[in-house]
Image (tube, grey):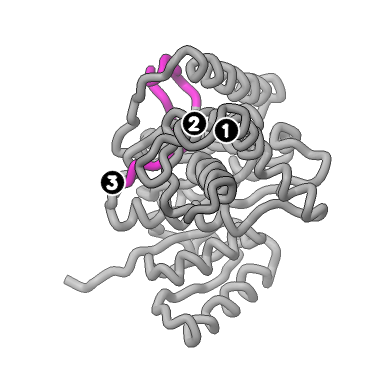
Amino acid sequence: MAFRRKKIAVIGAGQVGATCALMLAQRGLGDVVLLDTAQGMAQGKALDILQAAAVELFDSHVRGTSDYAQTAGADVVVLTAGSPRRPGLTRDDLLSINAGVVAGCCREIKKHSPEAVVIVVTNPLDAMTFVAKRELGFPRERVIGMAGVLDTARFRTFVALELAVSARDVQALVMGGHGDSMVPMPRHCFVGGVPLTELLPSDRIQALVERARRGGDEIVKLLETGSAFYAPAASIAQMVEAVLRDQRRVLPCAAWLEGEYGVRGLFVGVPCVLGGRGVEDVCEIALDEDERGFFENSVARVRLLVDDLARLGL
């Protein structure tokens, strides 16, 4: 039997999509097709990435296109297309702009890669993943929102900076929606196996929680003309690797809930087992009273976004 290399389609060749394509190629996860409707953008960036292979020594083939037919048969599709955040725009403001973009992309994905695992990155993340599942009609394990890995990375980074330790030794969890209602979980944060609550006073921990919630906004304000892309791209690459290599990683993802945590019919960030089929399982952990309150508030914010989709006819 002939060996078939894995195929990854990245929809949207902006900063996040192009950086993601580079990181996927560097990890040797498969051949990458970078697609964008702006003629020449995906082609130019893909050629640039491919030329880096001679220096970075990776063998993945990367090509750019504006034709969805070139993405056919993708094992994983990463959806980054849509308008990025800009200063003064919240994720919620992007709802009406990006819902149509995501719906159109998903119709093409369904046509050309009906067996793919789809990872949605477009903001507002939780609502756009809802739109994607509705348009795709895929089983819940094959439609996933990228949020928790990124939000957790930010929390881990700020904890590491505060304690002057390596971020690789910080384990953390962030749940809920992808926005300022997200729920960093200090009780489930450990530094080299030591609980964070034993290393920092409560006021410093709360300051880190608040910075994590505003992590994306902080970057948007500094850049002034765009939003984060290195950390989001790295987070996507980690998720794609978990799927293509069937690693069964426990990672926080926006998953379609069917009663877990008392939530039904929404995409919400929770810890998941991510493997070859996509979301292999949702991990339910016990929440204390405060955590439950914050989580339910975040779920309510997600539900409002989905309700707005219906109200706007999106």
The answer to which quarter of the image holds residue 103 is top right
Marker disc for residue 178: none
The disc, 1 or 3, on the residue closer to the chain's N-terminal end is 1
| Helix, strand or loop at mark 2 | helix
The answer to whether mark 1 and mark 2 are in CB contact below 8 A is yes
Residue depicted at 71% across the width and 24% down the height = 312
Q: Amino acid at mark 2?
A: Pro
The reply to whether residue 109 is in sight is yes
Neighbourhood count class around disc 3 (C-alpha, 10 Å): few under 14, some 14–19, many 20 upward? some
The disc, 1 or 2, on the residue closer to the chain's N-terminal end is 2
The answer to which quarter of the image holds residue 93 is top right
Marker disc for residue 205: 1
Residue 238 in the image: state x and y as whole percent.
Answer: 43, 54
Give the quadrant of the N terminus.
bottom left
Task: Give the residue number, with chain letter if any, for mark 2.
Answer: 186
Residue 9 in the image: state x and y as whole percent.
Answer: 48, 60
The disc, 3 or 2, on the residue closer to the chain's N-terminal end is 2
